[in-house]
Image: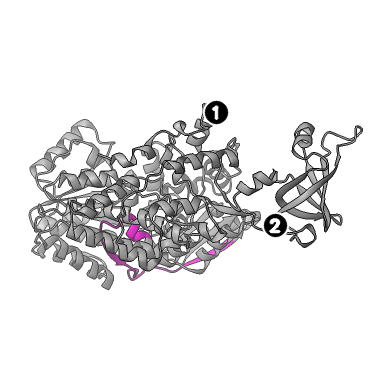
Amino acid sequence: MRPTLLNPLFTAAKTLHGVGAKIAPLLDRLVGRDARTIDLVFHLPTGVIDRRSRPKIAEAQRDQVVTLEVRVVNHQPPGQSRSGKAPFKVLVEDETGDVTLIFFHNSPAWIAKSLPVGATRWISGRLDQWDGHLQMVHPDRVMTAEEVATMPAVEPIYGLTEGLFPRVLSRIVADALARVPVLPEWLDENRVILRGWPAFHEAIARLHGPQTPVDVEATSPAHQRLAYDELLASQLALASVRGRLRQADGRRTLGTGVLAGQLEAILPFRLTDGQAQALAEIRADLAAPERMLRLLQGDVGSGKTVVALLAMVTSVEAGRQAALMVPTEILARQHFERLAALGAQVGIRVTLVTGRDKPKEREAKLAALAAGETQIVVGTHALFTDPIAFRDLGLVVVDEQHRFGVNQRLALAEKGTAADMLVMTATPIPRTLVMTVFGDMDVSILREKPAGRQPITTVLVNAERLEDVVAGLARAIRDGARVYWVCPLVTESEFVDLVAAEDRYRALREAFGDAVRLVHGQMKPAEKDAAMADFAAGRAQILVATTVIEVGVDVPEASIIVIEHAERFGLAQLHQLRGRVGRGQAKSSCVLVYKGPLGETSEARLRVMRDTEDGFVIAEEDLRLRGEGELIGTRQSGLPTYRVARLDAHGSLLAAAREEAAAIFAADPHLQSERGERLRTLLYLFERDAAVRLLSAG
């Protein structure tokens, strides 16, 4: 159970002072859920307004926020003949100069009360120069001497939502902070002292009540302290998952090497050094008494599937079964066709299970799996959602792992007795994110591309030159080329100015006739299959598609890909899409069509795509340009989200947190020591409750 000390933080935000029926829904929208006190505690400032500058008017910096002590000279209401848009002006002065305060749409009564002529007031806001005169448009603050004494000199700026005003949110956050208890110290005392970090309570107070602008920066001691707390909680949670999977119920899977040797002999290529190394690591894990939990990470086209097949064959050699789970039906069918053809040559039976199986067909497949007659099964999420029984499931392979959550991985693994697990991703991931997303796994990396992979020339083309692109395709198609044309939407939207796949399909049909096919996620499965089959067989030369082709689609004859509105795609997704070409013998090209003018980040993304094919370089650039939140899409199942930590700024802390979590778990796997109890508080604070349940389950 959650420690009672934390209960005040998990009360509904509507219990906070000033949160009524009107404000409560705004807070829910702000935090993206039913808001609680802790959501506001962790709603950290994004910056500050520095009000420490309190000069005389003559010395005040222009285009900066200043706080001035002034005397009110006169009021200048809008003239009767003027339009209602004219401002109300107030002239104020000190002994060195004067400033005109500008108010639009403010109540004259409020101005008269707040700034009575002859009174001394403090005003704070941005000072500008207009037509030779100093002015301040809508001062942020108009205060008496008593009020300025309580004004924060460095005022935090918070992210807002429509209808929620800064001062209202600041008051609510202040009440939330008042409920933060003094918590026991869970960090190693030496680490805190050496890094000069404050205690948790002090760190939260400093971030919400900065004394200088530096206090809210990611490098400040307060921010680093909280980031490390969150990263440590995350790494401890991953360690608990790893510990659960690696309890002493592992089984040795020792292959004979006979079937694998036969399979390698009939492959049309030799394994790269990277593939051989990864396979050796996987086989060593399979042979060990502990359960395997390994990530196979490779760039587009690096040959992960072959490594996975040979690993599954090792399981078959040991008399056990293997399952390959993939995110889409198109990819499942593609994997099945390849694996079944290879398996048949060495006497291994492979079957496909998807949601489209007819009842009698499904029944026969499941019976063969339960009896052990089928050694390898390929399927989508149906593999873990359906009542599928195995005779002896020894190895689970999960492709494009980031599309499945930890719970889904565990659900499939639990269908076997101590089944080993290998997960794969073709989305290269920066070193820091590997520890975040896959911190519960050992990692094998494939960096080389198999022999025969063609380099891809990438060019950037403004959408205004689209006719030139189409003319170039006409020449390429005459020479026998096959082309993907990718659009970001299925049908035209009145809200978004993007070319839809169906519109582009119709336009290209007018130019190229029956050579064009269309495939997108809203089509019926049989229609998608037919379009893909026509393209793969060469009956069609242009395939207009949405990102449904992003993962795994393999037509070696395709040598050109056009990506429309490329500025709207993330780097990782562009890299995945580009990887659909360059798989055969033909010289390959990627045309990134963009609509200008480009923003700075969009332009940088497209330049990176033009300049490199290295997915790991691209992934690091994506992290730098966009931060970890959107890199692979944190909202996708299974990916952690951080409230405090920023991996672009706190990457070095992540490595330290992982190392410390491993040491803690090795010494106290159930967190039963005095410090362990404090670390349980940390896990609950950052809502890694599932880890506590795993620890308690032993």
Q: Position of residue 652 (x, y in %)?
A: 38, 66
Quadrant of the image occupied by residue 306: bottom left
| Rendered residue at 39%/47% (across/down) | 532
| Rendered residue at 41%/65% (across/down) | 196
Quadrant of the image occupied by residue 164: top right
> Which one is closest to the eye, mark 1 or mark 2?
2
Q: Amino acid at mark 2?
A: Arg
Q: Is residue 129 left or right of residue 31?
A: right
Q: Which residue is mark 2?
A: 54
Residue 581 seen: no
Q: Is residue 528 above or below residue 255?
A: above
Specify the quadrant that holds the N terminus.
Answer: top left
Q: Which residue is mark 1?
A: 22
Q: Position of residue 510 (x, y in %)?
A: 58, 45
Outermost residue on the right side: it is 81
Q: Which residues are magenta?
A: 433-460
Cα–Cα gap, marks 1 and 2: 37 Å
